[in-house]
Amino acid sequence: MCDYIINKTQKLIAFIGLLRVSLMESTHSTLAFQDRKAGALLGLFAGDALASPVHWYYSLAQLKRDFGQITGYTKPNEHMEGSIMNLSNTGGGGRGSDKGEIVGDVINHGKKKYWGRGLNYSYHCTLQAGENTLEGQLTRLLLRTIAAQEGKVKPEIFLHEYVKFMTTPGSHNDAYASTCHRMFFANYVRGVAPESCADNDGHNTDAIDALTLTIPAIIATVTEEGPSDDVRKAAREVVALTRQSKVLPAYVDLYADMLASVVSGKKTLQSAAVDAGKRLGFDVKASAQTAWARAGKIDPEKYVGGDGTDPMVACYIDSSFPALLHLAYRYAEYGPRMALLANANAGGENVARGSALGALIGASYGVSGFPESLRALYNREDIEREINAVVGADAFGKTHVGEKYDL
């Protein structure tokens, strides 16, 4: 009799689990396509801005000492013990001398003072709470470019706007610029044509921040049919503008397929993550289940991660992409708030991963699934207008639709 009751109970639990997943999939499948697209773009900006204060924290103890936990948009501290921005090359890619003038004179004007040896400024020390990093600002630039081209992704036009934006003082507030940008403009000042300035240092270029710029290209190109050669091509082309890489295209294709599948409603986020993991030989489900077992009982209203159960990894794409899949699967059914806060509190390279995760979870839940706290970005009104201009719908209920952008 006892075995019979246990068996019946196990079947009931399994049935309830299947019902929960079925209801979640049904709800998500009924979201409007434009709501999903707008949600993906909002998620990109939210994930970027939430994580910026704790970008590249490789000690959870230090993160908690400096911030407690990230529970919303937070202004970065001025200094960060162990920051390696002060070891970075101001005249090109990777680590090197702080004597170069690419940072300060050519790009990130007036920000070189934060890169000096031994100063330990945090990477995004000049940003306000909820303000986007340089990578996030570049995705906004791409959105405006797409809007000005009536919804089309035109890489050659964006390249022109990218050079103008990066070389214009005051175009953004971020102190940090990644290797790919420093190498691009080191070539540019030597007289190399912009279309040939993309470079690779063999170390820092093949990184997850390459995915950030793909998101507007994917969203602008995807149809309700889901993944396509056009979507993958658009994503690869924008990456190739600033990075010369043999490694990245396969990951870009994989990410484009994931995001296109979720935003079109062809797959749930969890199934997309599992399928992507299979293509990489990574068991996403087992990784997430192990993490939940280690975390123990949680309160979904309060849990924001930071307990060491999520991977803390660097920017390199071969390790950071599986970490992205882990987070996407683990938090898919808990919504944008828990997913993006857990990503931030996990430390490591959490900004670009946050953007990529935010787009995926935003595509799953749509703008309507975001709490007001995550909508309250620093440049909220402008961002909402830019999103609406690309998705062609009033996703936020109060801003202009189809606004024209003249470049």
Image: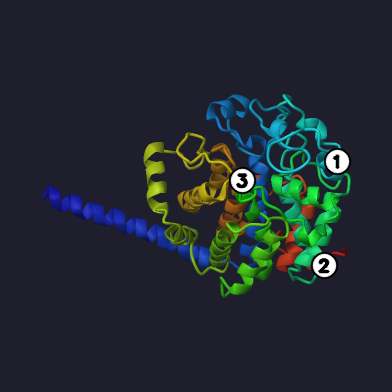
161 left or right of 341 in image: right
317 left or right of 140 in image: left
Instruction: Determine the residue located farthest toward the left in the rendered image.
Output: 1
Q: Residue at x 63, y 58 (%)?
A: 39
Work out whether mark 3 precedes mark 1 in sequence or the reverse, and give the earlier one: 1
Helix, strand or loop status at disc 3? loop
What is the quadrant of residue 262 in the picture?
A: bottom right
The picture places residue 326, in percent across and down from the top left corner, at 47, 49
- Give above or below for 303 relative to 154: above
- Picture quarter with the C terminus: bottom right
The picture places residue 398, in percent across and down from the top left corner, at 76, 59
Q: Residue at x 74, y 40 (%)?
A: 176
Q: Nearer the viewer, residue 2 or 234?
A: 234
Q: Nearer the viewer, residue 277 or 362?
A: 277
- Distance Cα–Cα, label 3 vs label 1: 26 Å
Work out whether mark 1 precedes mark 2 in sequence or the reverse, and give the earlier one: 1
Helix, strand or loop status at disc 2? helix
Disc 1 crowd, CA 10 A, few/some/many (<14, 14-19, 20+): many
- Distance Cα–Cα, label 3 vs label 2: 35 Å
Q: Nearer the viewer, mark 3 or mark 1?
A: 3
Can residue 385 be seen here? no
Q: Residue at x 41, y 42 (%)?
A: 291
Q: Amino acid at mark 2?
A: Ala
Disc 3 crowd, CA 10 A, few/some/many (<14, 14-19, 20+): few
Can residue 115 be seen here? yes
Q: Which residue is mark 3?
A: 203
- Give above or below for 285 relative to 26: above
Q: Which residue is mark 1?
A: 109
Q: Which residue is mark 2?
A: 148
